[in-house]
Image: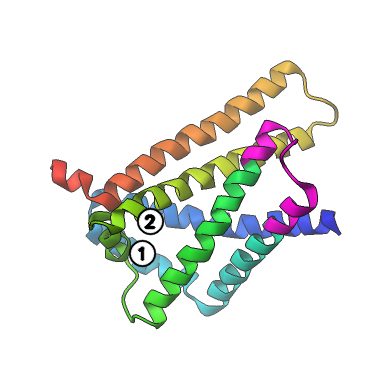
Amino acid sequence: MSISLKKLHRLTGLVIASFLLLHVCNHLCALGGPALHIRVMNALRHVYRFWPVEVLLLCCVAFQVVSGISLVIKKGFIRQPFYVVVQVLSGLYLSFFMIFHVQAVLRGRFQWKVNTDFYFAAGVANYYPQKLFFIPYYTLSLVAVFTHIAAVHYIKRLEQSMQSPSAQKQRQYEREAMGICIAGGIVTILIMISLSGVLYKII
């Protein structure tokens, strides 16, 4: 049962990762200005707001949260290797983030009747005191995404080894995971610069 749950957790994670790739690229477009971000977002919405796709994404998010917490409770992580602890902690934060972020976006669309575009996020990133919560909250979510991906990649590489990997191979896997984290750090900085308006203040 735990094996099938783990496989389903990974499968739904891949679905969400596909959406996140588009979402992160969309956010990076904000470096070219809000208008570019919104144009790209409107084009992408034809894909992820197509109702079967949107329902699939929401179901995957719900399953990720429930299955992730279930796997942590079942397996534990206190005495696990460092990379497992990193995977679990980043996953738990992502569960917290997805619960609050998805409900905020859905409430914005259906309850508050606002367009949840660039200005929906940038608004709380630029106004006091909302930004005191939003900036660390959103920054940590981006860091957690790439950290989680790096940890999963490292674990998957270890699993693919038919036997215990040599020290050289293990260092290679560590470099790959670190590369993902560094790339994630750069992307995080660029996105937060665009959302917080720092770029436009400098210009």
Towards the viewer: 58 or 83: 83
Towards the viewer: 168 or 73: 73
The reply to whether the C-beta atoms of the residues labelled 2 and 1 are less than 8 Å apart is yes
- The answer to whether residue 78 is left or right of residue 190 is right
Check residue 28 in the rendering and tell me which mark sits there, or answer none.
none
Residues shaded magenta: 69-86
Q: Determine whether 107 is above or below 17 in the image.
A: below
Gap in Å between the C-alphas at discs 2 and 1? 6 Å
- The answer to whether residue 143 is left or right of residue 173 is left
Q: Which residue is mark 2?
A: 26
Which of pointers 2 and 1 lies earlier in the amino acid sequence? 2
* Mark 2, secondary structure of its residue: helix
Counting other residues with Cα less than 10 Å from the Cα at mark 1, is it few (<14), some (14-19), or many (20 or more)? some
Amino acid type at image mark 1: Met
Q: Which residue is mark 1?
A: 41
Residue 155 in picture, x, y percent from top left: 71, 37
Q: Residue at x 31, y 51 (%)?
A: 132
